[in-house]
Amino acid sequence: MKTNLELYKVFYYVAKNKSITQAANELMVSQPAVSKSIKVLERDLNTTLFNRNKDGVSLNQAGELLYNKIKKAIELIISAEEDVTSLNNMEQGTINIGAGNTIMQRYLMPYIKEFHKQYPNINVIVHTLVTDELMKRAQIGLVDMVFTHLPNTIPNNYEVIKIKELHDILVVDKDSSYINKTISKKDLKKLPLILLPFNASNRKNFNKFCQKNNIVINPLMEIGNELIIEDCVLNGLGVGLSVREYVQNKLDQKELFELNTSFQIEPKYLACLVDSNRMNNIIIKNFLKLLK
C-alpha cells in the first residue's frame, strides 16, 4: 500500500460527517491538518474525492467508490482499537484457568472470587481436568494458565511461576493404631494407603520418592479426589497421603493426625504455567499479580 492508512481514516471521517470541521473534532486535530490529509490522499490517488460547497463537502463518484470500499475496513479497525482500550482497562475480556479439583478446592477459589470482584466484566472460565489434558488444551490456546504441582513435565516454551512450597504427609484419624508409631520406609509397603491415582500431579512427588528408595507400594485404594480421601481417613478406612498445607486446618482441630516418620519426602511446589508468548497479556498479568 503506497498510501498511509491514516489518510484513509481521515477520509472516512470527512465522508461520514460531510464536514471537515466535524471530522477534525472527532479526530481531535486541527481543520488545516484534515484538509492537508485529504489533499495528500487525492494527490496519491490522482483524483478528487469531494465536491466542496458552502454547507461542507459531499462525495463525488470517485469518493463514493472509495468510501464504499473502505468503510467496513476502517470501522473494523476503529472497533479493534476500542476493544484493545477496553481490554487494557480490564473492561472486557476472558481468562481460561486450568487446574485439577484439589488445587481448585484447596487454593484457587478465593483468588478467583477476588479477581471477579475486582474485574466483574472479565469472564472467568475454569477447566478442571488432569494436568496432561489441561496442557493439551493450553497448547492449542483453549487454556491461558495451568495450575499444577511440581515436579512435572513442562513444555520448553512455558514460564513456570512457583507459588507455594508444599509438603506430602501421611494422615490418619484419631482412633488409628498408627498414631503413636514411627513409620519407616519399609513400613510403607504394609500401610493401608489411600492415594490419588498414579498419574495425578499431586501424587507424582510421592511416586518419585518411592522409586528413588526402591519402595514398591500396594495402595488399599486409589481415589480421584482428595476430599474423598480425607473422608475415607476420617472414617477409619486407612492412611491417606495428603499435603500439610492443604489440611492444616483439620490438623489444628485434631480431626486428622500427621504420622511420625523416620524419613522426609522432598518438598514439592504449587506452580502456574503460562505460555511465554502470553506473559504480557494484561488479564493474565493481573491475575498473577493478585496471587502475589
Image (cartoon, rainbow, N blue to C red):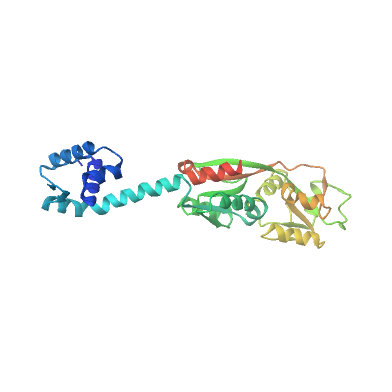
Query: Which residue is more in the foreground, 275 or 29?
Result: 29
Q: Residue at x 59, y 56 (%)?
A: 130
Q: How many marks?
A: 0
Residue lying at the far front in this picture: please name it: 54
- Camera sees residue 154: no
Where's residue 242, x and y in %? 73, 52
Question: Percent position (x, y) of residue 50?
Answer: 14, 47
Observer-nearest of 225 and 144: 144
Residue drawn at x 70%, y 45% as measured from the top left: 209
User: In this view of the protein, which residue sits in the foreground, 175 or 48?
Assistant: 48
Q: Position of residue 256 (x, y in %)?
A: 81, 54
Q: Pinpoint residue 146: horizontal percent, then vertical percent.
A: 55, 49
289 with respect to 206 (left or right): left
The quarter of the displayed image where residue 6 is located? top left
Left or right of 146? Residue 22 is: left
Q: Is residue 125 visible?
A: yes
Tell me which residue sits at (75%, 58%) in the image: 230
Quadrant for the N terminus in the image: top left
Along the horizontal axis of the image, is 147 left or right of 93?
right
Figure quadrant of the C terminus: top right
Up/down of 186 relative to 223, above or below: above
